[in-house]
Structures are given as C-alpha cells and as structure tokens.
Image (tube, rainbow, N blue to C red):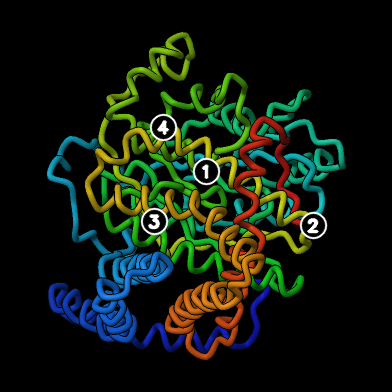
Amino acid sequence: MRPGHGPAAPVRSAARHRLGTRLDALDPRVRRDVVRLLTLLALLPLLLLLARGAVRLPHAFDPLALYGLAVLAGTVCLLHLAYSRYDDPAVRPLRSRPRHAEAFPALPARPRVSFLLAVRNERAHIEACVRSMAGVDYPDVQLVVVDDASDDGTPDVLERLAAELPLTLIRLEENLGKKGALVRACAVADGDVLLFTDSDCVVAPDAVRHCVTALVRHPELGAVGGHCRALNTDAGLLARVQDIWYEGQFRISKAAEAAFGSVTCVSGPLAAFRREAVWNYLPAWAEDRFLGAPFRFATDRQLTGYVLGQAWHGRALKDRHADSPFVRDHDYPELRWEVGYTRAARVWTRVPSRPGSFLRQQIRWKKSFIRNLFFTGRFMWRRGPAAAALYYGHALWVIAAPVLVVRHLLWAPLHLAGPLTLLYLGGVVLKGCVWGLAYRLDHPGDRAWRCRPLMSLLSCCVLAWLLPYALLTLRRGVWSRSAA
C-alpha cells in the first residue's frame, strides 16, 4: 500500500482485480467488444443529455448552450477513448500499431536502463527518492544523480548515499537548471533506455520493469510515461484535491492520447525514452530559446515534442547543433515515433500543500504550455485527425478559459446577469462530478472522488487567470521541486 492512503486501498484493488481477471479471461476480440459496450452503457446518461441539447439548439440558439455542449461532447469523447480504446503497453500488445512498424529498430530483450535524476535544494526528500530508484526490481540499471549547485545540505545527503548505493554522483558548482543538469547526466549514461524522475518523487519497485516491457514489446514507442499520484495526501485538502486530479489527468487524458500513440507530455515523475528517439535532440533541449531568450521551463513537454515531431523538424534541430557530441558522434535516423503511457508503472510525487507553492507550480506549467504550443503545435496536425483534434481542442480550451471566466464571473454579475454565472458554475461542477464518478468507477469504495468537483471550481475561479500572467512573465523564473 502506497504512502498517503488508508485502509480503503485494498478494497479498491480487490474490486479492480476481480473485474480485470474476468475480462482478461476472454478472447481479445470479445474483451474489446465487451469493454466498448460497458463504456457506452456507463456513458449513456451523458449521451442522452448531449443528444437532448443538440436537438434543442437549432430552435433556440444560445452561445452558452453551444459552449456547454462542446465541453460535454469533449468530456464524453475523452472518457470513451480512455476506457474503450486504451491498452496498457506494459500489460498487453497494443491493438493499434503503425503500418511502418518494421522501420523501428528492436530493443534488446533486456535493455540497459540509465535512471537519471537532477536535484536542487531537496534535503528533506531526496533520500526517499534516491532509495526508491535504487530499490527497483529491474536487474540492469545505471543510477546517475546530478546535484545542480544545491546550497541547503542536499550535497551532504547525496555523498552519504553515494557511499552506500551503486550510483554515480555528479556535483555542479554552477546552477545550470533542470534541463542542463539532466543533459550532464545523459553525457555519462550508457543505457538503451533513458529514464527520468523528479527529486520529490518515490518510484514503485516494478515501475522501471513496466516501462521497459512497454518499450521492448512495441518498438514504435520512442517514449512512454508512467502513472503519477500524490505522495503527501495527508498534507491537507489541497493535496487531496490534486491527487484526484492527477488520477484523472493520467487515467483519462493521457490514456486518450495514448490510444493514438501521441501522448504530448511524458511527465517528469516517470519518463522513459529510447536512446535513439531523443539522444540527438538533447542539446536543442538544453539550449532551448523562446522569444529571443533562454527558456528554462517546458522540460517534459518539449522533450516529448522532439520525439513526436522529429520526422518533420528533427534534421533542422540536429543541423543547428551539429558540433555537439550528442549529434556529431552518432546520428540516429529521424523516425515517426509514437509516444505511450503505461498505467502499470506507478510513481508518487509530493504536490504543493500551500496555496503559494501551488500557484507558482501552475504558473510554470502555463509557461510550459505556451512555449510548447509554438513547437508541437506546428506539426500535430500531421499525426492524424484524432491526435490533432485532442491536441488543438485542449489548446483552444486552455486559451479560451480566461475569456470565459471574465465573461461569466465578472461581466455577467456587473450586468445583473447572475443566472448566467450560476449556470456556468453549475456546468463546471457537473463536469467535475463526471470526472469524479469516473474515479469512483476505478476505485470502488473510495470517497475521495468528491474532491474532483472542487478541482474543477479551483481551475475555473483561480487557475484560468494564470494564463495571462504566465504570458506576461514568460522569461522570469527559476526551477525548484519544493512542494512546501
């Protein structure tokens, strides 16, 4: 049982296990059809509500009603994809494989893994992270930890661990930032798979094995991400709300993208990359510039973008850094890699427990979204209509959110249109309840699903305002993993 969860966890696991065992006993084609049928039955109330609204819309056109239908339709599509089309590549072979699968080189049956970590000022939590890395059950792992000029006692902890555990410790005298520090780690990495985690995380013992299994079974996967939850759920309501939100973002959003091999962000808590898919682009990643200045954010999204988009932009990126040993010493072919997600590979991260830290984290993520939109947005339309619809639909939703909030939470009350505000907030809560019920379906008996509507309200009333601020302060910021 993982840290931060109580006695309800075994009940949830037993219920999931029984259903999973019955489904796995079926013929694969029968299993697929049964899962699709069950998904449609579960979504039937939302489909009926969507159909009712669509029928009434032409007779009484209302922009708010149209917006509500669009949000509802998007939610239904995400849930349908996540529950009926997603296959865990670490558990079973993917049903949907690319026609050009033979173009991808196969990994060895047991590839060597370089497990890499960059840390700055994490004295309180770094030992738990490093010990979890050293405790994985995969037999051929190279551990590399880079201390990015910490000044809080972190170096002393790492020196003690390096004397006890089989790890390579690199100490930097000058702060390079997370990307620069990780590239230093990559320079000494000799693995077929480069696997990253964050310094405030704890990795499950079997997480590396699941990531490797997914990559070995599916040579077309250039990268695969794991499933992340909150480690410190006992830190308060804010932490619990984020934990349920993380579950949905991975179980639903990333699973929907994975159905088309186009996960757009292999998140930092557990990110596994094939060496061939990412090696030549590490200097471009470390030296990324945006609006004429070095850009220190977008670490996860940008590196994933290099895997997804190298078939179209890889050669130009390599030519730009032709003198780097990452490009000069070995030039890997630009392939149309796919990017996946494995729910079986578990990792837990310390989420911010105080409002100030939470808002700073969200601003960093908004900046990453803005920068990555100008890179990944240039080629996602080439990866097929479904993957493109998911990506650009999400981008439009994020961009439109501040406008919608201003209209419904400021303009409407000032113009004595209070019912419009209530209707908007009601729709936000309804969407949160739908995601919460999806959580309860996966975790029977867990009452934490009730936190999900709170996250929807928080996103609407607080987080939506951060996008304009992030845009105005795009060049400002330093990296830190502290969740205090």
Horizontal and vertical percent position of residue 354: 78, 62
Horizontal and vertical percent position of residue 456: 57, 70
Horizontal and vertical percent position of residue 76: 33, 72
99 relative to 325, above or below: below
Q: Which numbered mark, 4 or 1, is in the foreground of this view?
A: 1
Dot 1 or dot 2: first in sequence order is 1
Looking at numbered disc 2 in the image, what kind of residue is underneath it?
Ala
Looking at numbered disc 3 in the image, what kind of residue is underneath it?
Tyr
Q: Which numbered mark, 2 or 4, is in the foreground of this view?
A: 2
- Which numbered circle lies on residue 369? 1
Looking at numbered disc 4 in the image, what kind of residue is underneath it?
Val
Q: Residue at x 76, y 23 (%)?
A: 174
| Residue at which label 2 appears | 484
| Residue at which label 3 appears | 341
275 relative to 158, above or below: above
Q: Which numbered mark, 1 or 3, is in the foreground of this view?
A: 1
Whether residue 129 is visible, yes or no, is: yes
Q: Residue at x 67, y 43 (%)?
A: 469
Q: Which numbered mark, 1 or 2, is in the foreground of this view?
A: 1
Q: Residue furthest top?
A: 323
Dot 2 or dot 3: first in sequence order is 3
- Which numbered circle lies on residue 278? 4
Dot 4 or dot 1: first in sequence order is 4
